[in-house]
Image (cartoon, helix red, strand yellow):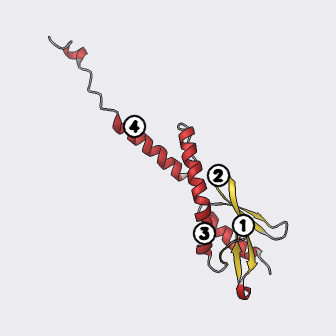
Amino acid sequence: MTTAPYLDLLARVLATEGWTVRRRYDRAPARLHVLSPCLPTIGESIRVAAGEGGVPWFIDSTGATLAPCHDLPGAVAQIGARLAPHAMAAAVRRAGEEQDARPCCLISRLRASLKRTRANARSPATPPDTSARWGPPGR
């Protein structure tokens, strides 16, 4: 069975959803490495294998079936469900470690923005300094 066309379609959909995809077709079986842009060290390897009745299925690195190859949205959802928690945890760690650096993920940017908004809301507004114009209090 030729698996590259199925993996190519999945790669296009995953890239559209923001995932980093690396095609690994040089060795059998052909695989697709899916990584989070924020956490490129953890990912999932996807391959295609014939399922019941010869229907091709996407298979993850543990051998578990993800979705039939004709169900691209289902496969993307399954891959996202497996990798998103790792990406979230990394984004939260990075946001805590690098508060001044600009984060690469949307979630990290949102968290940093919320922290700035909360910090600004906590600091009371400073009243204008009128001592120079009116003199010290009590005059």
Task: Decide which of tag 3 and tag 2 comes sooner along the chain.
Answer: 2
The image's mark for residue 126 is none
> The residue under label 1 is which amino acid type?
Thr
Q: CA distance from mark 3 to mark 2?
A: 18 Å
- Residue plotted at (48% across, 47% down): 111
Name the element at disc 4.
Answer: helix
Front disc: 3 or 4: 3
Task: Decide which of tag 4 and tag 2 comes sooner along the chain.
Answer: 2
Name the element at disc 2.
Answer: strand
Q: CA distance from mark 2 to mark 1?
A: 20 Å
- Res 49 → quadrant: bottom right
Task: Decide which of tag 3 and tag 1 comes sooner along the chain.
Answer: 1
- Residue plotted at (56% across, 48% down): 91
- Is residue 128 toward the left or the right of residue 10 in the image? left
**Which residue is disc 3 drawn over?**
78
Q: CA distance from mark 4 to mark 2?
A: 28 Å
Residue 10 is situated, as x and y percent measured from the top left of the image, at 67, 71
**Which residue is disc 4 drawn over?**
119
- Residue plotted at (64% across, 64% down): 15
- Is residue 51 toward the left or the right of residue 89 in the image? right
> The residue under label 2 is which amino acid type?
Leu
> The residue under label 4 is which amino acid type?
Ala
- Is residue 101 toward the left or the right of residue 120 in the image? right
In the figure, 71 relative to 35: above or below? below
Front disc: 2 or 1: 1
User: Going by the picture, which residue comes out furthest to the right?
Assistant: 27
Of residue 82 and residue 15, the one placed in the foreground of this image is 82
**Pointer 3: residues within 10 angstroms few (<14), some, or many (20+)?**
some
Residue 11 is situated, as x and y percent measured from the top left of the image, at 68, 68
The image's mark for residue 62 is 1
